Image (cartoon, helix red, strand yellow):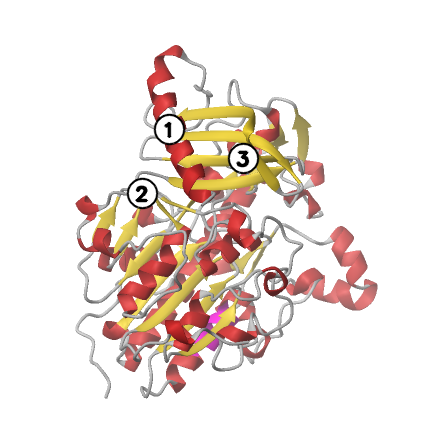
């Protein structure tokens, strides 16, 4: 029997954005069939560039609406700022040092054959589990199954769900709708396009379903429309934008004015910070229009021409709004089906993204802009709130299990956030920890509490950290220095703070090595 919804997720005047918000598993983790459905939304490369996080420019009415109905975690952090490791960590509820996934080369099941990931656990607990889009990183789980142990129905192929009246995207990696690129593919081939027309942005007047995000939405909606309430569902939807290239229908670009795009206020290395804490933003220069627009500096890293920087930032915002509209459509499908008030929704961006701060673009660091990520959890039985305590992505697994009323694997690295969702003042978590390897012989562990970030870089040989061999330390004060302009680790007036943060790090390392 369908449950009727009492609230309409509609935002008048914003119809442009959305029409209406607008193997085997161990028997010990099997329990009775729970009642609530789960919509599990992953978003690639999306930092908290949202209205609900205070961004004054972002047009994100659907995610803002979801945040107003659910729990907004203002200080949520990924475990490692790159897609493969952070997703493996979130899905297992284990830190990268426990999944042994620190880069994009390993195959998840080769390294973790017995780990029970989130959808696999829900499947074992009587859920119909389905997915579409990017949930695992393709480098970790190649092929179209996206981890066959996790899904009770075959994983949906987004290629089957592009709008039927529009040709699927073409060009290098199948990303573009430009008629020019399409014609060049025919006459000069993919190699020529890869070398000369692999652009970082594209603005073409096409419907939402002409690009991957729209196709993923179409597939998710079809699953919801077909759903029969004989068992609860766990639906994983992995949106691929705002990952590069920044391609989105023109109507989302039109929401913003290029000249108003905010350039980074601080675009050089922090005073007193180690050079190896930074990256050369190597993902971005692969695009054929980038090398001519940048140069490199010892102090400012990648120096980009302002007009190109604004174009990229414009594209990032457009893709965020494009994704927001797709989320609105999926939630509207839940409402239309009559199951919204019986569905838990968790929304997360897999890590942050640098948009020129510190002379950095992309991710791959331990800094705030790379590790700070959006996290929103909606449970229809819990009133809306904001949690301002630091939380981590390893906390999502136990939280979902408690919300759904199912058991969880015995060993998880995170804690359930349910009590904090119900009463934010009861949250006692002191810090979140991220990490990132550098140069194949260094590992940086970065601890973030409510005001500060403390990072240690240790020797990392044969993928083993030597915590007694500290190479460098960093300390940033986000109340007085939110742009991370000065490393205060050796400043006399920060000695007490540094001592406290080092104590926290020692606590963490003790727990990590148990």
Q: Residues within 10 Å of mark 3 (few under 14, many from 20)?
A: many
> Quadrant of the image for the N terminus?
bottom left
Disc 2: which residue: 54
Q: Earlier in the sequence, mark 3 or mark 2?
A: 2
Asked whether the viewer can see residue 417, the reply is yes
Q: Which residues are magenta?
A: 214-221
Determine whether label 3 and label 2 are within 8 Å by CB: no
Q: Earlier in the sequence, mark 1 or mark 2?
A: 2
Q: Earlier in the sequence, mark 1 or mark 3?
A: 3
Membership of 290 in magenta stretch: no
Residue 402, image x, y percentages: 28, 64
What residue is drawn where x is 63% and y is 68%?
A: 169
Secondary structure under the numbered disc 3 in the rendered image: strand
Residue depth check, mark 1 versus mark 2: number of the one nearer the observer: 1
Disc 3: which residue: 444
Residue depth check, mark 3 versus mark 2: number of the one nearer the observer: 3
**Front-most of 277 and 394?**
394
Secondary structure under the numbered disc 2 in the rendered image: loop
**Front-most of 97 and 178?**
97
Q: Kindly indicate the quadrant of the structure image that contains residue 77.
A: top left
What residue is drawn where x is 32% and y is 88%?
A: 230
Disc 1: which residue: 503
Residue 256, image x, y percentages: 43, 48
Residue 459, image x, y percentages: 61, 32
Determine whether label 1 and label 3 are within 8 Å by CB: no
Residue depth check, mark 1 versus mark 3: number of the one nearer the observer: 1
């Amino acid at each position: 029997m369908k449950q009727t919804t009492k609230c309409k997720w509609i935002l008048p005047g914003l119809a442009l954005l959305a029409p209406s918000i607008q193997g085997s598993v161990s028997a010990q983790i099997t329990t009775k069939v729970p009642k609530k459905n789960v919509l599990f939304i992953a978003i690639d490369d999306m930092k908290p560039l949202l209205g609900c996080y205070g961004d004054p420019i972002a047009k994100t009415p659907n995610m803002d609406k979801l945040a107003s109905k659910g729990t907004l975690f203002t200080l949520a952090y990924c475990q490692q700022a790159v897609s493969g490791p952070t997703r493996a960590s979130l899905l297992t509820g284990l830190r990268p040092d426990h999944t042994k996934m620190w880069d994009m080369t390993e195959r998840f099941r080769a390294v973790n054959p017995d780990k029970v990931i989130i959808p696999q656990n829900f499947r074992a607990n009587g859920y119909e589990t389905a997915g579409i889009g990017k949930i695992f990183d393709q480098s970790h789980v190649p092929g179209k199954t996206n981890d066959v142990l996790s899904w009770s129905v075959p994983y949906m192929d987004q290629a089957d769900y592009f709008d039927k009246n529009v040709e699927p995207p073409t060009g290098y990696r199948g990303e573009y709708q430009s008629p020019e690129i399409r014609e060049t593919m025919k006459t000069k081939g993919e190699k020529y396009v890869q070398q000369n027309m692999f652009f970082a942005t594209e603005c073409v007047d096409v419907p939402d379903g002409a690009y991957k995000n729209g196709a993923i939405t179409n597939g998710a909606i079809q699953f919801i429309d077909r759903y029969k309430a004989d068992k609860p569902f766990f639906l994983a939807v992995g949106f691929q934008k705002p990952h590069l290239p920044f391609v989105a229908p023109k109507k989302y670009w039109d929401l913003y004015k290029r000249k108003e795009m905010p350039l980074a206020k601080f675009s050089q290395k922090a005073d007193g910070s180690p050079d190896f804490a930074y990256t050369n933003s190597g993902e971005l220069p692969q695009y054929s229009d980038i090398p001519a627009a940048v140069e490199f500096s010892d102090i400012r890293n990648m120096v980009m021409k302002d007009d190109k920087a604004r174009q990229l930032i414009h594209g990032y915002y457009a893709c965020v709004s494009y994704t927001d509209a797709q989320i609105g459509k999926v939630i509207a499908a839940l409402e239309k089906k009559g199951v919204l008030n019986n569905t838990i929704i968790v929304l997360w961006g897999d890590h942050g993204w640098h948009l020129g701060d510190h002379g950095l673009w992309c991710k791959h660091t331990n800094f705030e802009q790379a590790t700070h990520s959006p996290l929103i959890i909606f449970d229809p039985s819990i009133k809306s709130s904001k949690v301002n305590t630091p939380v981590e992505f390893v906390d999502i697994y136990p939280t979902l299990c408690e919300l759904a009323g199912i058991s969880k694997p015995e060993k998880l690295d995170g804690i359930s956030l349910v009590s904090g969702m119900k009463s934010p003042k009861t949250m006692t978590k002191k810090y979140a920890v991220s990490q990132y390897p550098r140069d194949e012989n260094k590992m940086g562990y970065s601890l973030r509490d409510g005001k500060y970030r403390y990072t240690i870089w240790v020797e990392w040989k044969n993928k083993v950290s030597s915590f007694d061999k500290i190479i460098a330390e960093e300390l940033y004060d986000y109340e007085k220095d939110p742009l991370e302009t000065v490393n205060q680790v050796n400043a006399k007036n920060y000695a007490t703070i540094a001592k406290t943060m080092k104590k926290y790090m020692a606590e963490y390392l003790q727990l990590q090595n148990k």
